[in-house]
Image (cartoon, rainbow, N blue to C red):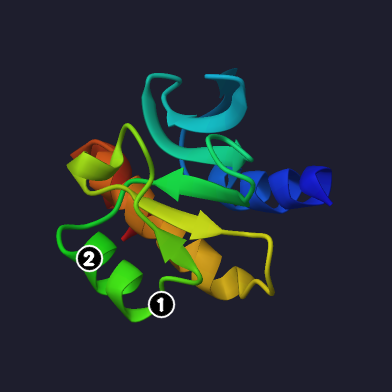
Amino acid sequence: MTDELVAKLGAICLALPETTERPSHGEPCWFIRDKKLFVMFANRHHDDRVGFWCAAPAGAQHALVSAEPERFFIPPYVGHRGWLGVYLDLPVDWDEIADLVLAAYREVAPKRLLAQLD
């Protein structure tokens, strides 16, 4: 199951301009221009759940975690910077995941790459 989740999440991330995948902190991670992290897979990373951590727009973390704590969480290390944790060990709406990944990309990507999206 974990390999399938990494593959689906990775396909969404790698469809965005100038993204790469490589391990970091023992987990698959996706970077912009191989430098700026925007999504990190979390396979029981500090708990017994499977999910991912991603950059998020201001206020999104609080809104989503407050509304649906069974699906969203504040991840360790990066949560204080507004990053969002998303559980993948329950039914997943991959269109919603794609929207969250795109929002993460938009938070981290330089303007030139953002222009390619619009």
Dot 2 and dot 1 residues touching (CB under 8 Å): no
Between 64 and 38, which is closer to the camera in this rendering? 64
Between 91 and 45, which is closer to the camera in this rendering? 45
Q: Residue at x 27, y 61 (%)?
A: 61
Would residue 67 appear left or right of 21 to someone viewing this image? left
Residue 78 lies, in percent from the top left, at: 30, 36
Asked which secondary structure carries label 1, the reply is loop
Numbered mark located on residue 68 in the image: 1
Residue 63 lies, in percent from the top left, at: 24, 73
Q: Amino acid at mark 1?
A: Glu
Confirm whether residue 116 shows in the render.
no
Q: Amino acid at mark 2?
A: His
Looking at the image, the residue that sits furthest to the bottom is 67
Would residue 101 appear left or right of 62 to someone viewing this image? right
Residue 98 versus residue 22 in the image, above or below: below
Looking at the image, the residue that sits furthest to the left is 58
Q: Residue at x 28, y 44 (%)?
A: 79
Between 3 and 50, which is closer to the camera in this rendering? 50
Ranked by sequence position, the earlier of labels 2 and 1 is 2
Residue 6 lies, in percent from the top left, at: 71, 44
Identify the residue under disc 2: 62
Residue 70 lies, in percent from the top left, at: 50, 72
Which quadrant would residue 31 be assigned to in this image? top left
Confirm whether residue 63 shows in the render.
yes
Asked which secondary structure carries label 2, the reply is helix
Numbered mark located on residue 99 in the image: none
Q: Residue at x 55, y 46 (%)?
A: 13
- Quadrant of the snapshot with the C terminus: bottom left
Mark 2 to mark 1 CA distance (whole Å): 10 Å
